[in-house]
């Protein structure tokens, strides 16, 4: 079991007494409109999960062929809706064309330079069919993995839906990842094709995506990739390799707009999304078709209370699971209008978010605590300049939200009238697991509140036994759910070890270990405190400390590196790297700069260390394990407390202190 570290400020959070009931006007017309209604759903799901999920699957989704068995559970491997045939692209598009949504806006897109467009369901369907046919023409067939490395433009969603339509699993790689990181993922997935763009706009600059793809594929490093499909976005000069690289706007002219959705088995691979863990390289989280479709559909519907008239905006990037589940699949499966924004708040437009809410009459806004904290810092005069009266519901995701930020969000953005759903979940869970249902569950600032119906969450101790008082423990899930990851891509063993073998209660029950520490209060509300493993969250981005260490030691000057997170007011955590140098290398500002840049090259800008601390030695146990707990205290300038008796050489600690 990893050492537990979020030095919990639980005394203060459990003293949070403020309770915000769902506003009556909101509750009245909500999808789930009272605590009692929630409780009934929850109890029904707990009593007979197969019946609960089976009924929803029938009511909410369109099937080509019904399933035989709702759940086949051979821990830790679950199969949902076996025997069924379905296609998520069909559920997100085709079925809405005959139910009155044909001319409804499916996607409202805003580019950073100010260009924008709206695609109706009919238009989006057409684009997806065209791209699906282009992929087929380039030799992509059912089961072939496609890499997607895109800016936040409609073609990113179109690419995902086109892959899903023909049964080609996708792996979206966040555009902020480096060529190296992209290459690793394409190699691991044995991708056959990459969809990218000439570039994308971010903070008034062009991200040169195609150049990065070229670098990733250089020297035949990814021999499985034989074609690259390039969307024109920024029109800057790029090189196009004959025979390998193709312009989307050229190829789409030559194909038909008719492309029936491929009937997929429920458990066919839908996508692989790489995420960081405490050990090794990022792992490919596997999600399959039917269960993921149902889970993202129903969570989007009930948690965001989707109505025909809503304009829903999730500010995530499609490179993360939030973008997959709650920009693309969940909202579109519901026939909702989803907003996509290419850019990010920046000096030239610090109020772009508020401007867009007013421009499009956004009713539901879903963002991350780190963003809220930076908005707070910029000041309330910015949101106050804009008409935010269309908003009726707010959401947060990605990390614990501090009550101050929650209150600011509630008062300044929501004007005190919008419920806030603080949604806890992970890449692995596919969809939201613990959250308020906005018309049903009273909220407490800083708590994700209660589990979604069908989700049996708990807090347990090291032995896997339930904690019955309010003290802290490990957050676990007790029963499989349709959106859960099925395995680690090509590594069942890693799946088992990472998530299912840490906590083994005497009863023999299988517990899904989320990697988070949490408390459950007297009302059964969950307070998620943060990771208990070597995973850190920097501005809501999940990074493994070991990945960053590997990147550092791949630099010739570095002998050893230990990376820890240090609390940061805006970003949640900031990366601090302790580094020992090889041979005659000497610490210097230039070297620190070079090392930071090296990490950016290996992983991407999101992993740039905030601070490099050169040291002569790292504190280790006698068995050679780096004592990160001590480094965390040092990094954040705290006193070192707790046991240091396992330290091999106490002199190292004194040295580190004096070097600080
Ligand atoms: C980790 C998962 C799931 C979408 C975004 C992140 C943290 C996520 C919350 C929340 C407290 C949260 C957890 C989790 N986290 N949401 N509402 N409250 N912590 O996905 O990159 O897979 O990261 O994010 O630590 O384990 P991810």
Image (spheres, rainbow, N blue to C red):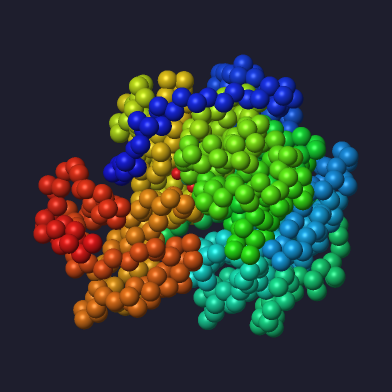
Horizontally, residue 573 falls left or right of residue 103, namely left
Relative placement, left or right, of 645 versus 295 is left
Q: Residue at x 70, y 35 (%)?
A: 392
Instruction: Identify which residue, 539 or 15, lies in the foreground.
Output: 15
At 44% from the left edge and 36% from the top edge, which residue is drawn?
528
Residue 631 visible in the picture = yes
Task: Tell me what residue is drawn at x 60 percent, y 62 percent.
Answer: 346
The C terminus lies in quadrant: bottom left
x and y percentages locating residue 348 in the rendered image: 63, 65
Q: Where is the N terminus found, in terms of image quarters?
A: top left
Residue 620 place in picture, x, y as percent:
19, 56
User: Can you say whether 583 is above or below 346 in the image?
Assistant: below
Q: What is the tally of numbered marks visible in this picture?
A: 0
Q: Specify the quadrant of the image occupied by residue 342.
A: bottom right
Residue 262 visible? The answer is no
Given residues 94 and 12, the one toward you in this image is: 12
Residue placed at 81% from the left, 55% from the top?
Answer: 118
Position of 69 relative to 356 (above/below): above
Give the camera-side residue of 66 and 373.
373
Position of residue 460 measured from the top left corner of the image (x, y, whole percent): 36, 29
Q: Position of residue 610 (x, y in %)?
A: 39, 63
């Amino acid at each position: 079991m990893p050492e537990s570290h979020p030095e919990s400020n639980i005394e203060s959070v459990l003293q949070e007494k403020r309770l915000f009931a769902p506003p009556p006007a909101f509750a009245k017309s909500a999808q789930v409109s009272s605590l009692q209604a929630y409780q009934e759903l929850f109890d029904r799901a707990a009593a007979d999960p197969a019946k609960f999920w089976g009924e929803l699957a029938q009511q909410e989704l369109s099937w080509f062929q019904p399933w035989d068995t709702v759940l086949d559970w051979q821990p830790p491997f679950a199969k949902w809706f076996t025997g069924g045939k379905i296609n998520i692209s069909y559920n997100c598009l085709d079925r809405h064309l005959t139910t009155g949504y044909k001319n409804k806006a499916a996607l409202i897109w805003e580019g950073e330079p100010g260009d924008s467009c709206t695609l109706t369901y009919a238009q989006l369907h057409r684009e997806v069919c065209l791209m699906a046919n282009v992929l087929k023409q380039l030799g992509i067939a059912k089961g072939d993995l496609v890499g997607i490395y895109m800016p936040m433009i409609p073609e990113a969603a179109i690419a995902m839906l086109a892959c899903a339509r023909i049964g080609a699993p996708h792996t979206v790689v966040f555009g902020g990842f480096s060529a190296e990181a992209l290459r690793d993922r394409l190699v691991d997935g044995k991708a056959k094709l990459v969809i990218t763009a000439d570039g994308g706009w971010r903070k008034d600059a062009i991200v040169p995506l195609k150049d990065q793809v070229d670098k990733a594929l250089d020297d035949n490093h990814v021999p499985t990739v034989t074609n690259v499909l390039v969307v024109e976005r920024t029109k800057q000069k790029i090189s196009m390799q004959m025979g390998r690289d193709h312009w989307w706007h050229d190829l789409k002219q030559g194909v038909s707009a008719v492309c029936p959705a491929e009937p997929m088995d429920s458990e066919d691979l839908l996508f692989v999304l790489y995420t960081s863990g405490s050990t090794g390289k990022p792992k490919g989280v596997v999600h399959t078709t039917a269960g993921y479709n149902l889970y993202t559909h129903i969570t989007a519907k009930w948690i965001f209370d989707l109505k025909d008239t809503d304009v829903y905006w999730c500010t995530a990037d499609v490179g993360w699971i939030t973008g997959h589940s709650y920009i693309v699949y969940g909202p579109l499966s519901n026939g909702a209008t989803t907003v996509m924004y290419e850019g990010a708040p920046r000096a030239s437009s610090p109020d772009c978010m508020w401007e867009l809410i007013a421009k499009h009459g956004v009713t539901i806004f879903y963002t991350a605590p780190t963003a809220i904290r930076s908005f707070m810092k910029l000041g309330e005069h910015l949101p106050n300049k804009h008409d935010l009266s269309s908003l009726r519901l707010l959401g947060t995701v990605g990390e614990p939200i501090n009550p101050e930020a929650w209150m600011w969000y509630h008062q300044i953005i929501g004007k005190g009238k919008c419920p806030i759903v603080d949604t806890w979940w992970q890449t692995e869970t596919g969809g939201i697991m613990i959250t308020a249902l906005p018309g049903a569950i009273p909220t407490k600032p800083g708590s994700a509140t209660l589990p979604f119906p069908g989700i049996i969450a708990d807090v347990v101790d090291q032995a896997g036994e339930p904690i019955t008082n309010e003290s802290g423990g490990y957050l676990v899930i007790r029963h499989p759910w349709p959106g859960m990851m099925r395995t680690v891509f090509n590594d069942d063993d890693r799946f088992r070890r990472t998530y299912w073998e840490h906590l083994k209660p005497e009863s023999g029950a299988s517990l899904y270990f989320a990697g988070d520490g949490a408390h459950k209060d007297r009302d059964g509300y969950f307070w998620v405190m943060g990771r208990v493993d070597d995973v850190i969250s920097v501005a809501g981005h999940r990074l493994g400390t070991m990945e960053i260490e590997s990147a550092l030691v791949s630099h010739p000057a570095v002998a050893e590196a230990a990376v820890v997170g240090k609390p940061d007011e805006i970003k949640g955590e900031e990366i601090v790297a302790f580094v020992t140098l090889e041979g005659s290398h000497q610490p210097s500002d230039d070297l620190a700069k070079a090392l930071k840049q090296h990490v950016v090259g290996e992983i991407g800008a999101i992993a740039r260390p905030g601070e490099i601390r050169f040291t002569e030695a790292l504190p280790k146990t006698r068995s050679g394990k780096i004592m990160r707990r001590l480094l965390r205290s040092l990094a954040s300038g705290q006193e070192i407390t707790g046991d240091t008796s396992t330290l091999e050489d106490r002199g190292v600690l004194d040295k580190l202190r004096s070097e600080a």
